[in-house]
Each structure stands twice: as structure tokens, then as C-alpha cells.
Image (cartoon, coloured by chain):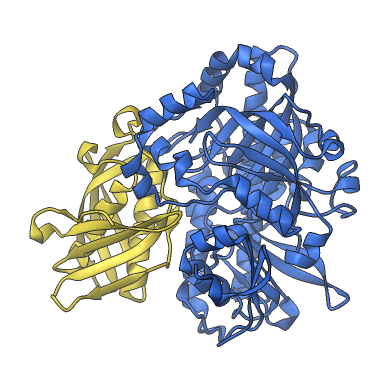
Amino acid sequence: MDLTRFEKVSAVEWRVEPFGDMRVPAILYADADLVRDMDDKVFEQMTNVAALPGIVRASYAMPDAHWGYGFPIGGVAAFDADDGGVVSAGGVGFDISCGVRTHLTGLSAAAVKQKKERLADALFAHIPAGLGSTGAITLDDAQMSAMLLDGAGWAVARGWGESEDLPRIEEGGRMIGARPDCISDKAKSRQRREMGTLGSGNHYLEVQEVAEVYDDAIAAVFGLALGDAVVTIHCGSRGLGHQIGSEYLRDMALAAKEYGITLPDRELACAPIRSDLGERYLGAMRAAINCALANRQIIGHLTQEVFGHIFLKSQLKLMFDVSHNTCKEETHEIDGKRKTLHVHRKGATRAFGSGHPSLPQPLRDVGQPVIIGGSMGTHSYILVGTTESERKAFSSACHGAGRAMSRHAAVKRWRGRELVDDLARHGVIVKSPSLRGVAEEAPGAYKDAGAVVDAAQEAGLARKVARLRPMICIKG
Amino acid sequence: MTAPHKTAAAEGYWEHFPHDADVGLRGFGPTREIAFAAAARGLAAAITDPAVVAPKQRIQITATAPDDEFLFIEWLNALIYEMATRRMLFSRFNVQPTAGGIVAEAWGEPVDVERHQPSAEVKGATLTMLDVNKQANGQWRAQCVIDV
């Protein structure tokens, strides 16, 4: 993007004052190089979001922002229901509550490396991954409703994981306000055999080594130490979320005129928070969040089974589980007053600072862990939320590296087999059902996650705690 | 942009266009329905090589919508739903008009991971770059970005 389209506030903050139908400014947090590399569509989308009814303070974009649909991926926007604020299916995305969790293994990376091949084979065999894969779980109607209401709590009650995991998941593992009755039979049928599956595309399970620690004190609170082995899982609400997203996106686009909403672009499809359609979407989306939380909880348990089998004394402990495609009701300070807002994070992570009441001890003393996934074979990062981020972007940070190249261009440039062999030479075992999928997810097709987290830190959105180096990557 | 994948003119053709994170899809044909069928082949090609998907089983799909563009979205989403719930891939399509919509046949087979090497599953059809129209040269073009 052309930097001259923005007012430079600092080296990592770029502002667009309202023009045209914009109700609030648009603010982008990134360094000049990251901004230059972004598609012009990011400018268009972040300024379009600023024109939506009831938007509060500003339309934000994170350092990993890229062209999405309606909202940019890496977009954050909060809406006030008392002021005609809207909820947008495109502002959440199709993979509702797609997110990341990191487990501590209690093992050193050195111990894991001794059994790396066996561990990689066992994880690949035990955890369903890729298109067309099904889990061992089939849900009947009653189980589906219970899962959609209770999320990770439902999974724990059935023996998938431990109750100690729940406080380490956003919303305590259970999103309140879920309404399974607002979800179509088609969406439920798409999910019936997909619990405990990774999915495909950029979803993965990685076994990683803590390669660098930036803040010893906070790393210790998170349970991380240099040379530790951890497991990170990235996936979402699977077919259920995709179907809900598709159906409500269509319904909102068709109903916008009825609600008197003029859309700068049809893909910004939305409905008033206080409308039948808006309330139904919120109920369905919250149920999809529970589906994603349950799904990651089950995969965490499957991972524990493998680790328990190979490393007899290994007991996985959940460090934290974050979601990055959500709309959540939160309280934030606006003009000196606490206000309840509906905060959309599309490809952005919630990043509460220390003292936030939703965080369990001892995390409340230091801030929320923010997990930033790298691309396959590259480093990931653990950050911590800051109190400053509340004022900067409604307590939000980036979510990943962000693509730098389309899937099609990646397939033309790289071959899956060569990538797998090359990563193996660099100490990373990649297991995937599809070599074409590996090529589409080539590390070179993504931006440098390091530059993204550095910009997030400099902007005050979150602070770096540790860097994770992959050892095993199970790709969906 | 991919080189257009042309077959016989009457069957239309498709192409992918670049999008940062997802895939842009375009189908062309002498009629709206042929353009929709061509786009469906492009949808299949976003997942696997359609040439390795044997047209062994046939399913029927109907779709209706208030206009051509939402009909295109409904058509793609119906295919995505069938692929997901039947664990199938499709490679051959026949689309016919009905009052207010289309009725279509899709031929394919169950997913064989080893042989099909499917990459990312498609999550849904988005309204991004959505456009269905008859161009000046008389060809119909149906396009949108699909989320993968």
C-alpha cells in the first residue's frame, strides 16, 4: 500500500481520518515495510468498516492484516448496540472461533528429539487431519445440542481433557448465550462426524521447542522455560462454523436494505445487534465458538494419549487457548465511561492485560498469553497482553504471520515433496495427507512472523515472551 | 491468474484469480448455466486435479435465489455442503435452469486421499468479487472468492 494514503502517527501507527461515509478514523498498526507489502484492499476494507452503523472509536487493522471479505483479516471493530451498532458475519469469518492453544508437555525438547520420528508417526496416525477425514466421535441430536451449549466443558465431562484446562480457555471454555436452535440442520449435519478433527489449509498441530525467552519472569508464570517442549494446536469450528458463516452472510446481505443499512460493499453484510437476525446470528456464532473450543479440547486429549503412550510420565497441561475469529460482548472504557460493546476480531487475538477479571490467577497478575502461529516450519511466538492495548485496539493483537502469496502462486513455485525434504534437513518433520496442501502452505508464502510480532510489541498491543521452534508439524 | 482451462466451447471454461489468503474463481460459458458448471469445475480444481476424480456417482442439487449472483453463491455452497457431508469430490456437472433457480447433476466419487491428494477444503463461497453477468461478447461470466 501507498504510505502517503495514511497520516503517520508513529513508526508503527498509521491513521486515516474519516472521509466519505466513514463515521470514525481507521488505524493500522504495522511498520512501514509491512504496510508497503499489504494489498490496497486492506485500506479499502478498513475504511469501509469505519462506515458501519454504531462503530465506536476506530476501525483497526493489526500488523498481519491482509485482504479478507468485508473486514480485512487482522481487523478489529467494536459496535455499540445502544447506538444502532451491528454484528457482521463477514466480520467474524467462516471459520468461527478458529484459534490456537499451547500445551506444556513437562518434557525437554532434547527428550522429545530422541523419539521424534516415532512421535510424529503416532500423532499423524492418531489425530484426524485433512479433507475428508472423520473423527471417532459421531454426535446424535442431544449430544450436538449439549456440545453447542457447553463447549470445552462438554468435552471434559466426557473424559476429553481435564477440568484444570477450563480456566485456561477464553470464557472458561464455555461461551454463554449459545443458541443451538439458531443453527440449521445442514450446519449440524456437516459437524456430526467432525469433532476432534484438525481440518485442512493452514490448520496444524506442532511439537515445538522453546528456542528463546524474552521475559523470564512472565515465561515462568506461563510455565515456559528455554529448551522445553510444547504442543500447539491450530483449528476451529470445522464444518459447523463454515455452514453458519455461509448461511448468515447470505441472510444478512439480503436483509440489509430491510434494516435500512447502506453497505459500502455487499460483503460487509451485517444486521443490527438488536434485531431478530442479529440476535439469531449471535446465538448461532456463540454456539460455533463452543464447537471450536470443544474441538480443540478433544484434539488436546488425543495428543495427550499419544504423549502418554510414548513418554510414560508426560502429562500435558494447557497453557492457554485463544480464538481469533469472534464477536464478543466486552466492557471497554469509552470517553471515561465503561461501556458494553460487541467487539469483532477477524484474524485478531484478544489480548487482555494484567488485572483483567476474566483471567485466572496467576495469569491475572501478568496478562493473558497471546499465541501467534508462524507458518509451517517457521517460528511461532508467545506474547502477553498489555493494559495499554485496551486503549490502542480494544485489547487486541495480531494472530499469525499472514499470507504474502496466494495459494495458487505457492503451488506454482514450490513442490510439496521438496519442501518436506528441505524442512527435514532443518530438523522439522512434516506429516500431511496432501503434498499439494504442503506446497500451498510453503513457509515462503507467508510473511515473516517475527516482523509482525515486533510491530505488535512496538505498537504496545502485546509484549514478546518466548519464541517457539517447530520440531514436528502435522498439517491438515 | 491461471491460464484459462478450456474445453469444448459449449462446455465453457474456468480460471482462478489471485486473492491474498483464499482463491478467486471464475466460470465462463455461452449460457449462465454453462458458466456455473464451468465454475464448479474450477471449484473442484481448487481442491484436487479434476482429471483424477472419476465420475462414478451422480447426485442432484437444486438451488433458488432472488438474483443470479446469490444463485451462484447458493450453487457453490450447495456443492461445498455435498462434498463435506458425503466425503466426495466431483468433476462433471450439468446445470439446467428452472423457475427462480437451477437444477443440477454432479458426478464424482468418494475422497481417496492417496490418489486425489486433496489440498485445502473449501469452507464457503464469499460475496467478495461476486459478479454474474453476460459480457459484451455474449459470454456469461460467474465469479467470486471462495474461502479455503
Viewer-side residue, A451 vs B70: A451
> Is residue A413 in view from this perspective?
yes
Horizontal arrangement in the rendering, residue A456 relative to residue A96 (left or right): right
Of the 4 image quadrants, the one containing the N terminus of chain B is bottom left
The percent position of residue A341, horizontal first and vertical second, equals 75, 70
Q: For this rendering, which residue is in front, A42 or B112?
A: A42
Which chain appears blue?
Answer: A
Q: Look at 68% across and 16% down and name the residue there.
A: A110
Is A334 rendered above or below residue A227? below
Q: Is residue A293 left or right of residue A200?
A: right
Q: Please tell me in which quadrant of the rendered image residue A126 appears.
A: top right
Residue at 46% of width from left, 54% of height from top? B21
| Residue A377 x, y percent position in the rendering | 53, 33
Q: Nearer the viewer, residue A193 or A209?
A: A209
Task: Identify the residue shown where x is 56% and y is 58%.
Answer: A34
Q: Is A26 located above or below residue A104 in the figure?
A: below
Q: Residue at x 58, y 54 (%)?
A: A96
Residue B107 image position (x, y, % from top left): 23, 45
Q: Nearer the viewer, residue A362 or B93?
A: A362
User: Left of B99 or right of it: where is A149?
Assistant: right
Q: Colour of chain B?
A: yellow
Tell me, yes or no, if residue A148 can be seen here: no
